[in-house]
Image (spheres, rainbow, N blue to C red):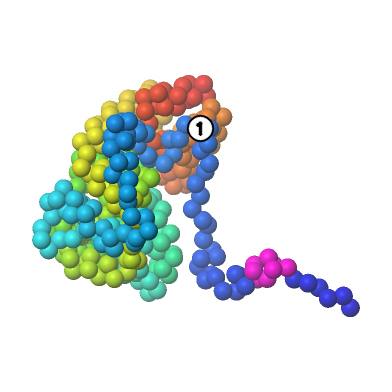
């Protein structure tokens, strides 16, 4: 009888099926579509580069960075710069993450897991649910109303029923772009026994924050990222809150998680925050112009306090998305049948020229 040889690749597949946790095998990897050759309006990035003079100053700061040494394990210079800008009290700390994704993971590794519940209003930032699955926790999504506002009674009932260890609230929300009502968020905070994470990724555009509320509640931390203000390439997020929480989270943070180039670049950029505030103001002005143009073309445009717009193309979301792809414009197709996101698309606000190309593509549809 001939001996059947099993290739190393087949053996690897069999062993992966045996040993990889079933909950991980059931997941779908986070997909980022290729953007080469297209106007990229799908990822909520700041479209503006730095002025040439500022870029040269930055490169001088990087010159001589000790790449042969591990970075400062606490990234103290960055944290102190952020503490000063946030006007935190002495008993309030800042912790840094490799993007806000790592902070979400650290929080859930510390608070969630088998037998515990992670909660968020949905639809919202997908990583809350994905990471809950990574850590083996149950994720409870509380549906928003059809206009993407919070359902007060449903949310409070879910908190009472499930007693979540952590609740994530994006403020403003992604993908809808709206700010939830502050009094209602305060009710949620007061009703929850576990931690409430206010995710202010888009704070630079929103003009609203819970930073000042950290000291008023025992169970609130605020999470932000430098990505949306114009530093997405640095992958730097930060968490502000009471020492009682952050000292525990710091035990889960991997050492040296913020590299030396990011630390130097972040301090440099934060010392020049006026530039990013000016860019944010330009983006907000363009957001209103694009929203008006979309409304004039018959699309339903939802209120936004971010650098993107959610709009509904009734019965034609997929065709609109593909048409724009054909015209070298990449946006996000969020269509989910029988949900508030049915027929919805999301477009990042770009430069005036990029926005004009997007609107021109729609005109030709």
Asked which quadrant contains residue 92, the reply is bottom left
Image location of residue 13, percent across then percent down: 64, 67
Residue at 40% across / 59% down in the picture? Answer: 129
Q: Quadrant of the N terminus?
A: bottom right
> Main SS of the magenta segment?
helix
Tell me the magenta residue range.
Answer: 7-14
Image location (x, y in percent) of residue 265: 30, 46
Is residue 10 on the magenta stretch?
yes
Residue drawn at point x = 17 percent, y = 63 percent: 242
Q: Secondary structure at mark 1?
A: loop
Q: Nearer the viewer, residue 233 or 299?
A: 233
x, y percent for residue 21: 52, 71
Judged left or right of residue 327, residue 223 is left
* Residue pictured at 56% horizontal, 29% vertical: 326
Q: Is residue 349 visible?
A: no
Question: For the residue carrying disc 1, how many other residues have a C-alpha within 10 Å: few (<14), some (14-19), or many (20+)?
Answer: some
**Numbered label tally:** 1
116 with respect to 29 (left or right) = left
- Residue 86 in the magenta stretch? The answer is no
Q: Which residue carries the number 1 mark?
A: 38
Question: Where 191 sits versus 212, above or below?
Answer: below
Residue 213 % position (x, y):
14, 54
Res 352 → quadrant: top left
Name the residue nearer the viewer: 122 or 326: 326
Q: Is residue 136 left or right of residue 194?
A: right
């Amino acid at each position: 009888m001939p001996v059947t040889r099993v290739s190393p690749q087949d053996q690897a597949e069999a062993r992966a099926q045996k040993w990889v946790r079933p909950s991980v095998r059931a997941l779908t990897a986070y997909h980022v579509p290729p953007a080469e050759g297209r106007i990229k309006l799908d990822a909520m990035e700041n479209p503006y580069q730095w002025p040439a003079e500022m870029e040269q100053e930055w490169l001088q700061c990087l010159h001589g960075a000790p790449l042969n040494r591990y970075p400062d394990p606490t990234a103290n210079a960055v944290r102190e710069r952020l503490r000063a800008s946030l006007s935190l009290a002495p008993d309030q700390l800042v912790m840094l993450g490799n993007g806000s994704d790592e902070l979400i993971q650290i929080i859930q590794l510390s608070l969630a897991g088998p037998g515990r519940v992670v909660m968020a209003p949905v639809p919202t930032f997908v990583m809350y649910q994905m990471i809950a699955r990574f850590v083996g926790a149950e994720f409870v999504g509380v549906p928003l109303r059809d206009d993407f506002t919070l359902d007060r009674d449903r949310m409070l009932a879910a908190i009472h029923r499930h007693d979540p260890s952590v609740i994530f609230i994006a403020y403003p929300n992604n993908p809808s772009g709206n700010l939830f009502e502050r009094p209602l968020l305060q009710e949620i905070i007061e009703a929850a026994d576990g931690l409430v994470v206010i995710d202010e990724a888009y704070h630079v555009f929103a003009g609203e924050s819970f930073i000042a509320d950290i000291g008023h509640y025992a169970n609130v931390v605020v999470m932000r990222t430098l990505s949306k203000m114009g530093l997405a390439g640095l992958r730097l997020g930060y968490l502000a809150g009471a020492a009682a929480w952050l000292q525990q989270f710091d035990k889960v943070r991997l050492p040296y998680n913020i590299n030396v180039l990011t630390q130097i670049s972040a301090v440099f950029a934060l010392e020049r925050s006026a530039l990013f505030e000016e860019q944010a103001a330009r983006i907000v002005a363009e957001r209103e112009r694009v929203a008006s143009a979309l409304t004039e073309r018959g699309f339903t445009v939802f209120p936004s306090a971010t650098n993107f717009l959610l709009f509904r193309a009734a019965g034609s979301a997929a065709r609109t998305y593909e048409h724009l792809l054909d015209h070298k414009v990449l946006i996000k197709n969020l269509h989910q049948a029988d949900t508030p996101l049915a027929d919805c698309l999301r477009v990042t606000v770009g430069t005036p020229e990029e926005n004009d190309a997007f609107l021109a593509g729609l005109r030709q549809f």
